[in-house]
Image (cartoon, rainbow, N blue to C red):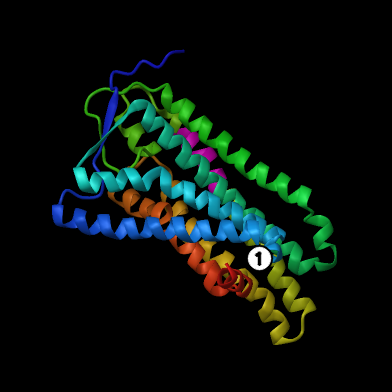
C-alpha cells in the first residue's frame, strides 16, 4: 500500500522563539553535544585498545557509549541548526528516518541497560562461573539481541507512521520528529498507532526496567545473606553505582514520557522530558563512569 500523504515536509518549531534564549541554548547544547562525542568516544577508544578493559562489563559499556554518540547525533545537530536559523523544515522521509533511528537507538539502550544489570548480577552472585556464563560468544549474542530488538521495535513504528495521511498544518511542536507529535498531525485514523505506542513501547520500556529491578533485588539479597563484613558489601555496591545512576537518568524521563496512556497530549512536558534523555544523559554517562571507576580513570590517564 502506497503512502497517501498530502504533506511533503514538516516544520520543527524547536524549543523557543526568543532570540536571546536561542543563542544561549545553542551554546549550552553545543557544549553538551561535544561532551557526549568526546567523552563517549574516549570510552570506546579505551575499551578497544586497553587490554585490562577487555571484559564483559566494559564490552557492554563500549556498546552503551556507541549508542550515546549516535543517539545524540540523531537529534542535536538539527536542533542546533534551528537555534541559528529559526524553524527547521524536514522532509517526510527525513522525519521518518529521524523517528526510526531515535527509537531504534533508544530502545536498544533500554534493553542494553538490562543486560548490563544481568552482567553485574552474575559477577556478584555467581563469581566462580562468571567467565563461563559471560563468555565472549554469550556477550556478543546478548549485544546483537539488544540491537536487534531495538531495530524491530523502531521498524514497527516507522512502518506504521509511513502509512498515515497528513494534511492541514505541518508544524511539529518539538525539536525532532517523535511519534506523538506526528500522530497529532495525522488526518487518518491513528488507533492502531496508539495501541502500538501504548502496548509495545511501554513493554520495551517497562520490561527491561523490571529485569533491572529484579537483578538488583537478587544482588542486595545475596550480599546481606552471604557477605558479613561492611567492606565486603560496599565494594560490590560501588561497582553498581554508576550503572544505577545511568538507569535512573534514562528510565525516569522515559517512563514519564511513554508509559502513561498516550490519549492525552502534553507537548511542553514531552519536549522538556525528551531533552533529558536525548541530550543531557548521553553527555553525563561518560563522566559518571570515568569519575566513579578506578580502572577507567587509570586507562584514561594512560591514554
Residue on which disc 1 sits: 216
Relative to 264, residue 126 above or below: below
Relative to 222, residue 75 above or below: above
Direction from residue 175 to residue 105 in the image, left or right:
right
- Residue at horizontal 41%, vertical 60%? 35
Q: Which residues are magenta?
A: 194-205
Query: Residue 95 lies in magenta, yes or no?
Result: no
Residue 122, how many percent across, how many down?
76, 62
Query: Residue 196 lies in magenta, yes or no?
Result: yes
Comparing 69 with 17, the one in front is 69
- Quarter of the rendering occupied by the C terminus: bottom right
- Residue at horizontal 47%, vertical 53%? 255
Determine the residue located farthest toward the front in the rendered image. Answer: 303
- Residue at horizontal 42%, vertical 36%? 99
Asked if one can make out residue 252 in the rendered structure from this viewpoint, the answer is no
Comparing 41 with 57, the one in front is 41
Q: How many marks?
A: 1
Q: Secondary structure at mark 1?
A: helix
Amino acid at each position: 500500500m502506497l503512502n497517501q500523504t498530502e504533506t511533503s515536509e514538516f516544520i520543527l518549531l524547536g524549543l523557543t522563539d526568543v532570540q536571546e534564549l536561542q543563542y544561549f541554548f545553542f551554546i549550552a547544547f553545543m557544549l553538551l553535544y561535544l561532551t557526549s562525542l568526546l567523552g563517549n568516544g574516549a570510552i570506546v577508544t579505551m575499551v578497544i585498545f586497553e587490554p585490562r578493559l577487555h571484559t564483559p562489563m566494559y564490552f557492554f559499556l563500549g556498546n552503551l557509549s556507541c549508542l550515546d554518540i549516535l543517539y545524540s547525533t540523531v537529534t542535536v545537530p538539527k536542533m542546533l541548526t534551528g537555534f541559528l536559523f529559526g524553524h527547521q523544515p524536514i522532509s517526510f522521509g527525513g522525519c521518518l528516518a529521524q523517528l526510526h533511528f531515535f527509537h531504534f537507538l533508544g530502545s536498544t539502550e533500554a534493553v542494553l541497560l538490562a543486560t548490563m544489570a544481568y552482567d553485574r548480577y552474575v559477577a556478584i552472585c555467581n563469581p566462580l562461573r562468571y567467565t563461563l556464563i559471560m563468555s565472549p560468544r554469550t556477550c556478543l549474542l546478548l549485544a546483537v539481541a539488544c540491537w536487534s530488538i531495538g531495530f524491530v521495535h523502531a521498524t514497527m513504528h516507522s512502518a506504521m507512521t509511513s502509512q498515515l495521511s497528513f494534511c492541514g498544518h505541518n508544524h511539529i511542536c518539538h525539536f525532532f520528529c517523535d511519534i506523538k507529535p506526528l500522530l497529532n498531525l495525522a488526518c487518518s485514523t491513528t488507533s492502531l498507532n496508539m495501541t502500538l505506542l501504548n502496548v509495545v513501547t511501554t513493554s520495551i520500556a517497562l520490561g527491561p526496567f523490571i529485569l533491572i529491578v529484579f537483578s538488583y533485588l537478587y544482588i542486595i539479597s545475596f550480599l546481606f545473606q552471604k557477605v558479613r563484613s561492611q567492606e565486603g558489601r560496599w565494594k560490590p555496591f560501588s561497582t553498581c553505582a554508576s550503572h544505577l545512576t545511568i538507569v535512573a537518568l534514562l528510565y525516569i524521563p522515559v517512563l514519564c514520557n511513554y508509559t502513561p496512556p498516550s490519549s492525552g497530549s502534553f507537548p511542553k512536558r514531552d519536549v522538556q522530558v525528551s531533552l533529558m534523555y536525548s541530550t543531557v544523559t548521553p553527555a553525563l554517562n561518560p563522566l559518571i563512569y570515568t569519575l566513579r571507576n578506578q580502572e577507567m580513570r587509570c586507562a584514561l590517564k594512560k591514554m
